[in-house]
Amino acid sequence: MKWLELEREGCIAGVENLLASEDCWKNRYQNLSDVDVQRVPECTDQFLLMIEAITERYRLIESLDVQSQFLNVQIFLLDDFRLRLAQISQQLSSPWEEPFIQILNCAWYIAYVLDEWNEVDIFIRIQACGKRAHFRGVFDDVADMYRHIWQQRARDLTVAFYQHIRARIRRYERENWFSWDSCESLDLTASFCPFLLEVRRLLNYVNSVISPVSAAKIYELLNEKVADVLLKTITNISIKLVFIVSCIGDTRKISETFQPYSSHSNDCFYVIQVKKRAVR
């Protein structure tokens, strides 16, 4: 059907224009970005509007079979956009480079929207007919693929986070703990500061760009990496009582660093477990 081909080609051309725009990765509500908890980039918002416009154009067609063909075009376009996001993120030299986290926000938001579309009447009717008569929604598969790309890129981000903070704790590992006087003030070890400051810097950056609705999972993953670094540090140091006491004081500062972001997650900080293991 010529109409189907025109919809597909028109949307592909539209996506090309969106991704070439200077405002592509800026927040869709530039003047009201604080109220957008999803922090959706302009290109993602406009792309979904194009997909919705296709629905409105075929909504009044009586044949469910023809509607199903249009739906297949929409699913093709959604998958094509996902592949474009994956390609763009792979071309970046670092997860700290824009638009890496913006792509995380894209993937999270599109998966969320597709879950909502599964409950829309027209898609329920299409799902109930023919080969789509199963328990899964019509957009479940493509939504899962968007969640998959989010998980992949979130792992890339946490690996980069680990590498940065691991490099900053080297001096702390090389501390001559046997020369320390156990009576000294051990509230915060000076050599621990570079590590602590790097954790704060990266957390502040992530918090400034990641969507609050997905932040809980991100902070959980970052917590794990902080715990990994601290546990590795502990195993690399010849344990002495003065070090154990110092480690407890230093890790308390890590907990304080994460505290502003704790509202995003009800999980206990993994760094608390580090304290307990250190004492043992």
Image: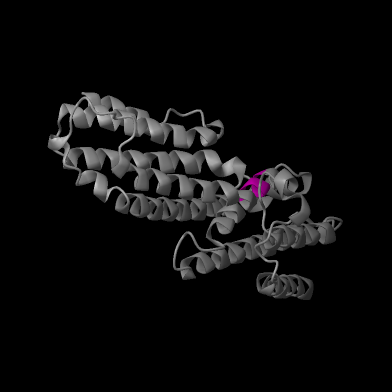
Left or right of 178 in this view: 193: right
- Whole-percent x and y of residue 142? 58, 54
Who's the residue at 61% across and 55% down the image?
Answer: 106
Rendered image quadrant of residue 94: bottom left
Quarter of the image with the C terminus in it: top left
Indicate the position of residue 24 as horizontal and vertical percent values. Answer: 67, 66
From the viewer's perspective, tell me whether residue 107 is left or right of residue 186. right
Q: Residue at x 40, y 51 (%)?
A: 161
In the image, is residue 109 above or below residue 79?
above
Looking at the rendered image, the quarter that the N terminus falls into is: bottom right
Image quadrant assignment for residue 57: bottom right
Query: What count of labels does the image hold?
Result: 0
Q: Position of residue 16 (x, y in %)?
A: 67, 74
Rendered location of residue 213, percent (x, y): 61, 41
The answer to whether residue 177 is above or below residue 8 is above
Observer-nearest of 208 and 103? 208
- Whether residue 15 sits left or right of residue 195 in the image: it is right
**Is 277 rendered above or below residue 204?**
above
Residue 164, by quadrant, is bottom left
- Judge left or right: residue 54 versus residue 146: right
Magenta part of the protein: which range? 111-115
Residue 143 against residue 274 in the figure, above or below:
below
Magenta segment, principal secondary structure?
A: helix
The residue lying at 69 percent from left, 63 percent from top is 43
